[in-house]
Amino acid sequence: MTLLAITYLVTTELRYNFQTVTRERVHVNATSPTGLDVEFDISLPQVPCSLLNIDANDPTGQPQSFHLDRQHHIWKHRVKLTEDGNIRLIGDRTKLEVGSTLRNEAHLIEEMSKLGVPNGTTPTAAVEEEPEEELCGSCYGAAGSDDECCDTCEDVKRAYKRKGWHITDLSTIEQCQNEMEGADKNDNDEGCNVHGIIALSSGGGNFHLAPGRSLDSLHHDANGEVSIFDVLMKTFEQWNVSHSIHKVSFGDEFPGHTHQLDGEWRTIVDAYGMYQYYFQVVPTKYVFLNGTVIETNQFSVTEHLRHVNPGGGRGLPGVFFFYEISPLHVEIVEEYQRGWVHFFTSVCAVVGGVVTIMGMLDQFIHSRGSPSGSGQLLG
């Protein structure tokens, strides 16, 4: 009986003292992180990929780099919303061109004015008369060298972007004609998924999904012209910012980490909108029992829908993610509940207590079983 009681209590103490728990400590961060990795996966089921660009800005509104490399990349994937409300991927993913987003109406008008078009109209892109070559597609004057070829529509777009030019009518580009035919059939029914990993500045700012500056998808009238008003209305009509966030994180995973926005839907039905998320990013260090350290981040988030209308001057539709780094630093350390010293102390207390109690119980039982007294002899 004594051995069974000691074994049970010692086992219980062993489990309790060596149970892994986490302790959180919060302190002011003396140094600022050198960068911020952001992983995201977002679908806009009503915005075609041809209309969508991604960009990032610092707190002053100036562009900031995504620092794309082998570890950091951005992809786009055509999607279609099924009847049961699920998102289905279509075709293969392709790299998404970064930068050159339109955030407000002034940017749109500025881009139109850069084309040197009077009275708010934009002529179709001029196509140079060049001899056709079998194995080398024309870059329509945007080639970086005499031997550069543009065999696909993406090649032409890339060459124009490098020159700082605009293609205002893709139908004038031979490589893009088939793409335009397919886009006319599919864009109204398709959306776009954007996912990737980017590196941003730790000084704060935002990254956003918004209409692109390329103006590639504009429809022109019989004279090959389009007004700024037509461009503005088309931008609003084709940009329903209803979206699904599959994942947003600011660093590596660690045990117990939660992401508040994962799997969330946001549907806009009443008006044009600019959806804004505001992240407070908290640098976090997680230390495992074996000494392994993960430097990552946690975040809290608030959100706001800003209604915008054509001509209202409040901006263009888009999904914006604003972030700032908290001056506080959280350190989460795995450790044992109490450790060896407390365990041995508890074992001594258990053994001594059990032996004492069992001795007292044994003495009590023995005294109850013996005669109560020696009695008296009668003479």
Image (cartoon, rainbow, N blue to C red):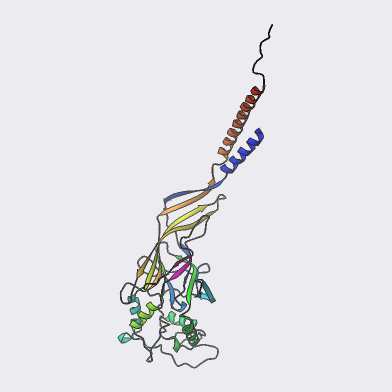
Figure check: 276 above or below 121: above
Residue 144: in sight, yes or no?
no
Figure check: 37 above or below 221: above
Q: Main secondary structure of the magenta part?
A: loop
Q: Position of residue 234 (x, y in %)?
A: 38, 80
Q: Position of residue 352 (x, y in %)?
A: 60, 31
- Drawn side of residue 266 relative to residue 362, left or right: left
Q: Position of residue 57 (x, y in %)?
A: 39, 68
Which quadrant holds the C terminus? top right
Residue at horizontal 56 percent and vertical 46 percent from the top: 19
Q: Which residues are magenta?
A: 240-269
Furthest residue in direction top, as rendered: 379
Residue 355: name its quadrant: top right
Residue 294: in sight, yes or no?
yes
Nearest the eye: 300 or 204: 300
Question: How many numbered discs, if any?
Answer: 0
- Drawn side of residue 25 relative to residue 232, left or right: right
Q: Position of residue 266 (x, y in %)?
A: 43, 68
Residue at horizontal 43 percent and vertical 78 percent from the top: 51
Specify whether residue 378 is painted magenta.
no
Nearest the eye: 63 or 14: 14
Residue 339: name its quadrant: top right
Figure check: 179 above or below 339: below
Which quadrant holds the N terminus? top right
Residue at horizontal 66 percent and vertical 34 percent from the top: 3
